[in-house]
Amino acid sequence: MINLFNAHIENLSIHRVGNKSRNESIFLSAQPYTLNDEIMPLLKEYFFKAFREKEENYYQFAHEVDLEYNELYNFATEIFANPTQIHEVSKKITTHLFEQSNHPHIKNGEVYVAYFTNTSIQNNVVDAVGIFKSEIKTDFLQFEEQEDNLEMVLQQGINLNKLDKGCIIFNFKKEEGYKILSVDSNRYDSKYWLEHFLNVDVFQDETFMTKKYLQFCKDFAKEVVLPAEDKKEEVLFMNRAVNHFAKNDAFEETAFLNEVLDNPDLIPEFKNYKVDRGAKYSIEDVSSFPIANAAVTDIRKKLRNVIELDTNIQIKLDFVNPESAEKFVEKGWDEEKQMYYYLVYFNKEQKS
């Protein structure tokens, strides 16, 4: 989990990059931008808003030979070692981005390189480097008094409500390539920002593994449990899966299967499904890992524990107390009506 509320912009450099294939140039500012109290909160909101609204999927710098050959990794390391030199390094970063800007679809724009203090990641307060790019210009009106009339002047500028591209490099997990967050709102070239400029891989930590494994379970429930059993068992399987993750600090697959799969016949189905589909979720060779409790909480909030019937009736099963759904809800078939039914047992109705 990250917390950017107390982050402070210590330094900001602004440059501009064009598109090399269109013979557009690069402009590098001679000096850092002079920040003031009026623009500081606006810039913080502009830089950080997209990251607050986006699910936290971390990346790390990578290279097919060795991490030390990744240019952005070296630039970030240089800045963290000596933050006073960030403006000079920001020119190298912008030049590196310009060298990748050779696809005809890539838009020109302003590049902001910022140094942040007091950012928090996984309860660690660290410094961070932000690299942001604005590309889309928005039309807006200015008004001027000219003699007896109020005149409209059409101008163009940046919409501070939408960041086009950006990344935050936290001074955390350096040996593994730092922990990085990235956004790309204008994905006209999916490889331009993440692959060519940043050169990153997904950071496969406990949060990543927890999310991926539970997503795998969700798809297994939908594609295997539902056809083999029914909607109730699909919901209850995911209920038991999430609860297993919630009450354990570490995941062990054998214990998970024995606890979560009520039908023993589904255990080989689960293993075969993992062989066929595991690579999609990066879990094909994974059988144990630490569990990220925050990730489990996020996933629980997104799960639907509702059985929707074609008679316009919904049955909501209790994820907090799964035993109730298993013991007091039965599914049957009515020969006379030629319809399925759910039978619900209870002692008394609860007052809301």
Image: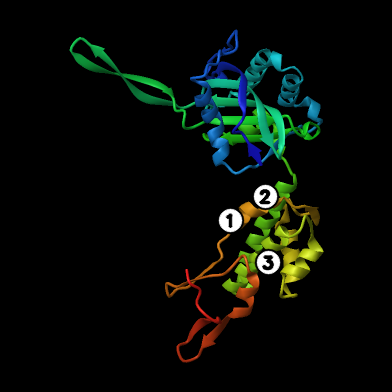
Q: CA distance from mark 2 to mark 3?
A: 17 Å
Is residue 199 found left or right of 52 in the rendered image? right
Residue at image coords 64%, 64%: 238
Q: 308 above or below 211?
A: below
N-term mark: 2 or 3: 3
Q: Secondary structure at mark 2?
A: helix
Q: Position of residue 251 (x, y in %)?
A: 78, 57
Residue pointed to by mark 1: 301
- Report the amino acid beneath label 3: Arg
Is residue 93 found left or right of 108 in the rendered image? right
Is residue 340 found left or right of 81 in the rendered image? left
Of 209 and 301, nearer the camera is 301
Q: Position of residue 90 (x, y in %)?
A: 65, 17
Of 248 and 230, nearer the camera is 248
- Report the amino acid beneath label 1: Lys
N-term mark: 3 or 1: 3
Residue lying at the far left of the rendered structure: 148
Q: 202 above or below 157?
A: below
- Location of the N terminus by quadrant is top right
Residue pointed to by mark 3: 240
Q: Secondary structure at mark 1?
A: helix
Specify the quadrant of the image occupied by residue 231: bottom right
Residue at image coords 76%, 58%: 248
- Report the amino acid beneath label 2: Ala
Per the rendering, the mark at residue 294 is 2
Kindly tell me whether residue 250 is visible in this rendering: yes
Kindly tell me whether residue 188 is visible in this rendering: no
